[in-house]
Amino acid sequence: MGIWHKFIACNQVTLPSSVFEEAHCYRNKKGRIHPTNLRSDLKAARILKKEATAIEVASVQNQFAPVLAPYLHTGELEAIAILQKEKTPTMKFCTADGTAWWATVLLDLGDRLISCEEALKQSGLMRSVHNKLSEKRFKKELRVYQEYKVRGLGLRI
């Protein structure tokens, strides 16, 4: 059983519908491409799929200044819209994208973020991870984005 199946076996994983639709494959450590099989995971109720409306996604995007908005992808915007809508404090946003972290912090949802490394650790699946997925990088960048928030950098005025 691969790490993905181990991870979804011990977590309630929810994917934004746009991510679900675009994530057809992944590349392993050796560079080989493999299908994700998300449809079978969804059909077997191993993962959930949630959707934000186009209006909700646009509402999130319109809060950001041009310095940030163009760098946020649809899946990230939809995930943030879902976080805003879902008041469940245990629902976390796990991504390795610093721009998505910045946006999430600006909207006062930073406490709902989790690094990939920490998500694995909390699941009992700790392993060595690339710096991009590390808790160290996550915490370092979150401090920067908190400062940006205080200075008002990234929000539309």
Image: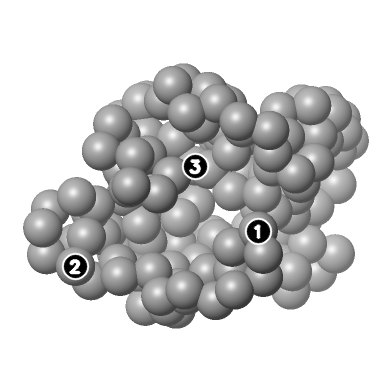
- Residue 117 visible somewhere in the drawing: yes
Q: Report which quarter residue 105 is drawn in.
A: top right
Cβ atoms at labels 1 and 3 below 8 Å apart: no
Q: Residue at x 34, y 39 (%)?
A: 6
Q: Nearer the viewer, mark 1 or mark 3?
A: 1
Q: Which residue is mark 2?
A: 40
Sooner in the amino-acid sequence: mark 2 or mark 1: 1
Name the kind of residue labelled 3 in the image. Answer: Phe
- Asked if 29 appears above or below 107 in the picture, the reply is below
Question: In whole angstroms, how far apart are the C-alphas of marks 2 and 1?
Answer: 23 Å
As helix, strand or loop, the secondary structure at mark 1 comes to loop
Sooner in the amino-acid sequence: mark 1 or mark 3: 1
Cβ atoms at labels 2 and 1 below 8 Å apart: no
Q: Which residue is mark 1?
A: 29
Name the kind of residue labelled 1 in the image. Answer: Lys
Q: Which residue is mark 3?
A: 93
Measured as percent of width and height from the top left, residue 47 is found at 24, 52
Sooner in the amino-acid sequence: mark 2 or mark 3: 2
Question: In whole angstroms, how far apart are the C-alphas of marks 2 and 3?
Answer: 22 Å
